[in-house]
Image (cartoon, rainbow, N blue to C red):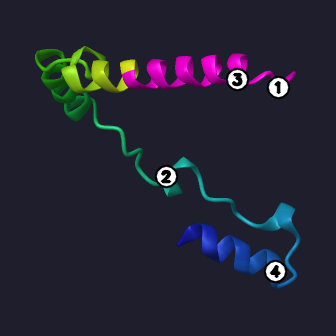
Amino acid sequence: MELQSAAKDISGGIDPADVHEPGAAWKPMHHHDAGVAKSKLAKRSATKRHWKTKMWKRRTQLRLDRTAALHAARANSGLVTY
């Protein structure tokens, strides 16, 4: 509210040096809550990391196989690629 009134005063023609600026109290509270962060960290350490799951390992291996097949096809095609 104070910030809006200061902006209104300045846009109304009052010299900015004469307008009372609101202090740090006008800033909204930070969204970070330390308690929530600690609880999420504790939950995360109890669960498996995503790269340790079978699904992640299978998808990674599929990507590697697909890339190797693409490189082999390019090498066997005779096309010059830079």
Chain part drawn in magenta = 62-82
Q: What residue lies at 35% left-to-right and 38% top-to-bottom?
A: 32
Q: Secondary structure at mark 2?
A: helix
Q: Earlier in the sequence, mark 1 or mark 2?
A: 2
- The circle on residue 74 is 3
Q: Earlier in the sequence, mark 1 or mark 3?
A: 3
Give the answer, above or below, for where 9 lies relative to 44: below
Look at label 3 and name its amino acid: Arg
Q: CA–CA distance between discs 1 and 2?
A: 66 Å
Q: Quadrant of residue 38?
A: top left
Look at label 4 and name its amino acid: Ser
Residue 55 pos. (x, y %): 23, 27
Look at label 1 and name its amino acid: Leu
Q: Earlier in the sequence, mark 1 or mark 4?
A: 4
Q: CA–CA distance between discs 4 and 2?
A: 22 Å
Closer to the camera in the image, 64 or 51: 64
